[in-house]
């Protein structure tokens, strides 16, 4: 038998997988990186924003060469009801300082670049090949089967995303539950750069990130997003799956209503639909993180459940990159020791514990449960918009003191509820 | 005039694996609650009910998002695999 044997096989050419392959290949290991799409990124979508700190540590100044869309300098958050919107706008150069900068990305371009970086570093990076199954011998993962062909390695890194069929089929992870994920849907609208900059108040290369709570999710846990690319806008929704069957609208109806909302429509006006995409998002935080390693394997990125959805931000890409990096570092250590057993690979968990990944997931561990509260997506946006109407709408009827007006709306939600939710909200962050 | 979901999907790039469905369903499954999950959640709008309440599904426009798998594998969804290598949707933007 003279089959080729790799130091590591990495399944998935997304951000987690390509990062892991890059770090390993750079250190001279023989690495096979497998991606099922025709090119890396062709099966992937995201809302839009990559927090740069993670990749910056691995490839300093990456944004100068990588195909990023725009650097975010403007943050907006809106609470919406069917007709109203209350918006907070934060515009600051602090958002763009090196180390705390973030970029809107399109995965079709960005992932391809990172995959090519791994190849340049020496990895055998193959796209258009699907791994069908893990090879498990004596309870140890020893390789993968692709189209009937066996490929073997000392260790397999699973970076196959939120739909990690391989880990599930091999019984390494339990099936993901509807309560643990959301569905994301996105429409990309083409517009000239100048139009985007004028509409959002940006100069060239600057970008905006905008999140929406309230009516867009039609009472479900979730919300909307709008990100500026160079010459397009990414508009979409993220909706928790747990109660989606009971929703009064389909996801498409929600998307249409969202795009036609008076707050959104002027921004996407005359935009040409370029693509419609969808993907699930892990959003149960720490509670869905389970098996991370075992004899001959490591799991990173979305496949491991490393994603933070904390309402006003979704973070999965920086967690994917750093977990890919830490998986690679674990393999480097294991190679040194010549030991790829579970006992040796457990240092992955230790590195994760010390990193922002498990620290941040722990800090926000109660947040997903807090978000399950229906008042957050239904009553509070309505309450706020009623208070706003009382502040700004003048129709000639005699004035009522402001505190009385506000009280009426607070009482409609219930003062006890407000106090309880306020307290829980504060505790969960 | 509302642009239909079919017209929206038509801008996407697909390499459909004709005659080889990567997702298969049991259209005779009768629980309406279960069907509504798919009708409401599929971001490509591929699960449709006719007037008699029968579920119809066409895999050709699939975005491979995984939602129907998470919701209904084992009930309505009988099989859910990724399309064969090189087949299926190809996001140019993503
Ligand atoms: C709508 C939406 C909005 C989001 N917004 C943000 C955001 O603004 N900021 C942020 O940081 N995160 C965001 N996220 C989360 C983020 O996109 C994910 O956390 C991130 O993509 C995870 O990267 P990954 O490398 O782990 O997995 P993926 O990007 O899913 O990569 C997995 C790769 O594995 C490949 N693959 C899978 N199975 C196989 C197989 N059997 N054989 C070969 N290849 C295989 C896939 O084709 C894919 O390329 C969002 C997600 C969604 C859906
Ligand atoms: S995987 Fe997603 S897009 Fe494809 S049929 Fe299922 S829900 Fe629809």
Image: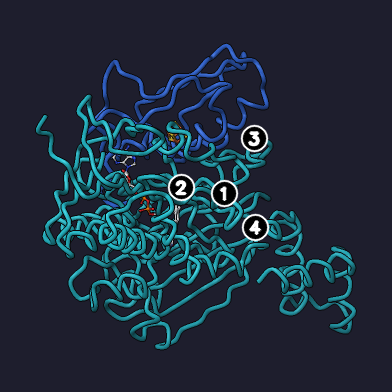
**Tag 3 and tag 1 share a subunit:** yes
Task: Tell me the chain of label 3.
Answer: A
Residue A391 left/right relative to A13? right
Q: Which mark is residue A368?
A: 4
Q: Earlier in the sequence, mark 3 or mark 1?
A: 1
Q: Work out whether mark 1 precedes mark 2 in sequence or the reverse, and give the earlier one.
A: 2
Disc ID at residue A185: 2
In the image, the chain rendered in cyan is A
Q: CA distance from mark 3 to mark 1?
A: 12 Å
Task: Read off the chain for label 4.
Answer: A
- Secondary structure of the residue carrying tag 4 is helix
Do the residues bearing badges 4 and 3 touch, measured as CB atoms within 8 Å? no
The residue nearer to you, when weighing A258 against A348, is A348
Q: Is residue B26 left or right of A83 when viewed as pictured?
A: left
Q: Which mark is residue A239?
A: 1
Q: Earlier in the sequence, mark 4 or mark 3?
A: 3
Whether the residue carrying mark 2 lies under 8 Å from ligand 1 is answered with: yes
Asked if residue A342 lies left or right of residue A157, the reply is right
Find residue A179 and report its horizontal and vertical position in percent: 63, 44
Q: Which one is in front, A257 or B42?
A: B42
SS for dot 2:
strand
């Amino acid at each position: 038998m003279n089959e080729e044997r790799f130091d590591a096989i990495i399944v998935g050419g997304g951000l987690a997988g390509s990062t892991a392959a890059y770090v390993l290949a750079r250190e001279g290991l023989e690495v096979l990186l497998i991606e099922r799409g025709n090119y890396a990124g062709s099966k992937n979508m995201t809302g839009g924003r990559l927090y740069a700190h993670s990749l910056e540590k691995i490839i300093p100044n990456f944004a100068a060469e990588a195909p990023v869309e725009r650097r975010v300098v403007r943050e907006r958050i809106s609470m919406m009801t069917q007709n109203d919107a209350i918006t907070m706008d934060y515009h600051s150069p602090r958002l763009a300082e090196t180390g705390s900068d973030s970029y809107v990305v399109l995965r079709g371009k960005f992932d391809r670049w990172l995959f090519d970086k791994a190849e340049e570093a020496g990895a055998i990076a193959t796209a258009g090949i699907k791994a069908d199954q893990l090879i498990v011998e004596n309870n140890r993962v020893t390789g993968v089967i692709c189209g009937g062909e066996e490929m073997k390695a000392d260790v397999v890194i699973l970076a196959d995303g939120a739909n990690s069929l391989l880990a599930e089929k091999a019984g390494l992870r339990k099936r993901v539950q509807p309560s643990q994920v959301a569905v994301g849907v996105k429409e990309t609208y083409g517009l000239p750069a100048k139009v985007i900059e004028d509409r959002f108040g940006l100069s060239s290369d600057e970008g905006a990130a905008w999140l929406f709570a309230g009516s867009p999710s039609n009472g479900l846990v979730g919300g909307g997003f709008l990100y500026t690319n160079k010459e397009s806008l990414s508009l979409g929704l993220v909706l928790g799956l747990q109660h989606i069957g009971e929703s009064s609208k389909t996801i498409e109806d929600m998307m249409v209503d969202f795009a036609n909302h008076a707050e959104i429509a002027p921004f996407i006006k005359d935009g040409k639909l370029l693509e419609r995409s969808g993907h699930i998002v892990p959003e149960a935080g720490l509670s869905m993180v389970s098996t991370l390693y075992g004899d001959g394997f490591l799991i990173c990125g979305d496949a491991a459940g490393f994603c933070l959805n904390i309402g006003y931000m979704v973070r999965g890409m920086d967690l994917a990159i750093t977990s890919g990096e830490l998986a690679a570092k674990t393999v480097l250590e294991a190679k040194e020791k010549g030991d790829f057993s579970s006992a040796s690979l457990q240092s992955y968990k230790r590195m994760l514990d010390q990193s922002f990944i498990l620290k941040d997931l722990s800090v926000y561990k109660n947040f997903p449960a807090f978000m399950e509260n229906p008042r957050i997506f239904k009553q509070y946006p309505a309450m706020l918009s009623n208070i706003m109407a009382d502040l700004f709408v003048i129709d000639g009827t005699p004035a009522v003191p402001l505190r009385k007006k506000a009280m009426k709306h607070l009482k409609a939600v219930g003062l006890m509820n407000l106090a309880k939710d306020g307290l829980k909200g504060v505790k969960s962050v | 005039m509302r642009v239909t979901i079919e017209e929206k999907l038509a801008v996407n790039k697909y390499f459909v694996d004709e005659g080889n469905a990567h997702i298969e369903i049991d259209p005779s499954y009768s629980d309406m609650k279960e069907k509504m999950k798919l009708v409401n959640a599929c971001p490509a709008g591929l699960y449709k009910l006719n007037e008699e309440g029968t579920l119809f599904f066409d895999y050709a426009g699939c975005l491979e998002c995984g939602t129907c798998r998470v919701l209904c594998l084992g009930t309505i969804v009988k099989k859910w695999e990724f399309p064969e290598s090189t087949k299926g949707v190809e996001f140019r933007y993503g």
